[in-house]
């Protein structure tokens, strides 16, 4: 039994892959932004009620962590897009 050789990527398959990556990235960023907005609103209300600096630092760390995730996703997307453009 002969194993078929891997097909060379076509411009159409590369375009489809790039579109899928754009969609995935948009979903990821939207989810993070939505979640951050909700958490920030909740945290702001909690901080206003308690007034503790410790809680404010905790919220700031969470927001920075999410921003780091978004930054990584954007860098990943740009890398894929750059490789696609070079092909």
Image (cartoon, helix red, strand yellow):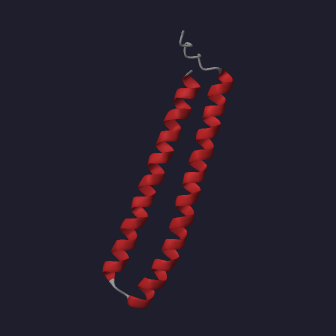
Q: Position of residue 14 (x, y in %)?
A: 62, 27
User: Total label count?
Assistant: 0
Farthest residue in the top direction? 2
* 45 is higher (above) or lower (below) than 39: below
Farthest residue in the right direction? 12
* 37 is higher (above) or lower (below) than 28: below
Nearer to us in this view, 72 or 31: 31
The residue under the point 61% across, 42% down is: 22
Q: Position of residue 47 (x, y in %)?
A: 42, 84
Q: Position of residue 49 (x, y in %)?
A: 43, 90
The quarter of the picture where the N terminus appears is top right
The residue under the point 50% across, 66% down is: 36
* 45 is higher (above) or lower (below) than 36: below
5 sits to left or right of 48: right
Farthest residue in the bottom direction? 49
Q: Position of residue 61 (x, y in %)?
A: 36, 66
Farthest residue in the front direction? 1
The residue under the point 60% across, 50% down is: 26
The residue under the point 52% across, 77% down is: 41
The quarter of the picture where the C terminus appears is top right
Locate residue 4: give its quadrant: top right
């Amino acid at each position: 039994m002969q194993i078929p050789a891997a097909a060379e990527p076509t411009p159409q398959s590369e375009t489809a892959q790039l579109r899928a990556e754009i969609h995935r990235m948009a979903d990821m960023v939207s989810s993070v932004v939505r979640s951050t907005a909700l958490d920030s609103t909740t945290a702001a209300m909690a901080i206003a009620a308690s007034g503790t600096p410790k809680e404010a630092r905790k919220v700031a760390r969470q927001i920075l962590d999410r921003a780091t995730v978004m930054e990584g996703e954007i860098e990943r997307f740009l890398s894929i897009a750059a490789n696609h453009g070079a092909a």
